[in-house]
């Protein structure tokens, strides 16, 4: 829910164009998360945050273009997985004769994805965790 970190650093400075996902059950305020550029809340709220989002759109605390950007990134992820999902239906069922091959392929793919997605933050000067009340510009100026 930190706009400076999600937008200024991750997207603008580092050029990240993928999907940002919360830690498990780490959403404090979904509207603030959307405003900051957090794309996917995990686990989902089972509709609890839907009314908050609708109200925020109506009262102007959430802009439609910010919600659209979050939706667009989620749809892009789904569409990028389409080929993989279509191929899954064409794969051979797992048997004792091909289980090792499938396992090795999945392990190699998992390692590749992890290497492309992992972000390591070095916690110099105890920068993390971020203070909850600190605004983005103050954070940027301090560090």
Image: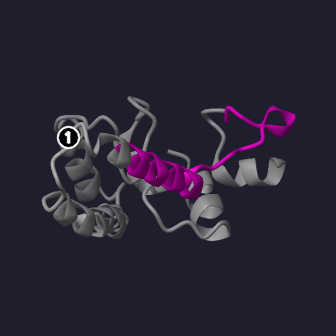
Q: Nearer the viewer, residue 123 or 52?
A: 123
Q: Is residue 27 visible?
A: yes
Instruction: Write the residue at 34% across / 70% down.
Output: 65
- Residue 67 higher or lower than 41, as above or below: below
The x, y position of residue 30, in whole percent, is 35, 43
Residue 29 position, x and y percent, is 39, 38
Residue 31, percent across and down?
A: 36, 47
* Main SS, magenta residues: helix
**Residue at x 35%, y 61% (from the top left corner):** 70
Residue at the front extreme of this rendering: 97
Q: Which residue corresponds to the image point at 30% horizontal and 34% vertical from the top-left?
A: 43
Return the x and y of residue 127 as percentages of the image width and height. 77, 37
Q: Which residue is mark 1?
A: 95
Using the image as rendered, state which of residue 10 and residue 35 is in the foreground: 10
Specify whether 72 is left or right of 93.
right
Q: In the image shown, does 55 or 28 lie closer to the viewer? A: 28
Residue 80: say if magenta: no
Nearest the eye: 114 or 141 = 114
* Residue farthest to the right, as pictured: 125
Q: How is the image coloured?
A: one colour
| Whether residue 3 can be seen here | no
Does residue 79 appear left or right of residue 125 in this picture? left
| Residue occupying image coordinates x 56% and y 58% | 116
Packing grade of label 1 (10 A; few <14, some 14-19, many >=20) is: few
Q: Is residue 121 rendered magenta in the image?
A: yes
Query: Which image quadrant is residue 59 in?
Result: bottom left
Q: Secondary structure at mark 1?
A: loop
In this picture, which residue range is highlighted in magenta? Answer: 103-130
Left or right: where 5 falls relative to 62? right
């Amino acid at each position: 829910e930190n706009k400076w970190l999600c937008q200024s650093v991750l997207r603008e400075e580092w050029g990240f164009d993928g999907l940002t996902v919360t830690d498990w059950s780490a959403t404090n305020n979904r509207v603030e998360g959307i405003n900051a550029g957090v794309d996917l809340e995990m686990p989902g709220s089972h509709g609890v945050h839907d009314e908050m989002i609708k109200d925020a759109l109506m009262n102007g605390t959430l802009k439609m273009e910010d919600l659209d950007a979050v939706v667009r990134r989620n749809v892009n992820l789904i569409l990028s997985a389409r080929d993989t999902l279509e191929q899954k239906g064409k794969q051979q069922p797992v048997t004792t004769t091909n289980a090792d091959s499938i396992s090795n392929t999945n392990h190699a793919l998992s390692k590749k994805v992890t290497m492309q997605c992992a972000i390591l933050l070095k916690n110099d000067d105890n920068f993390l965790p971020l203070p909850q009340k600190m605004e983005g510009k103050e954070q940027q100026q301090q560090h």
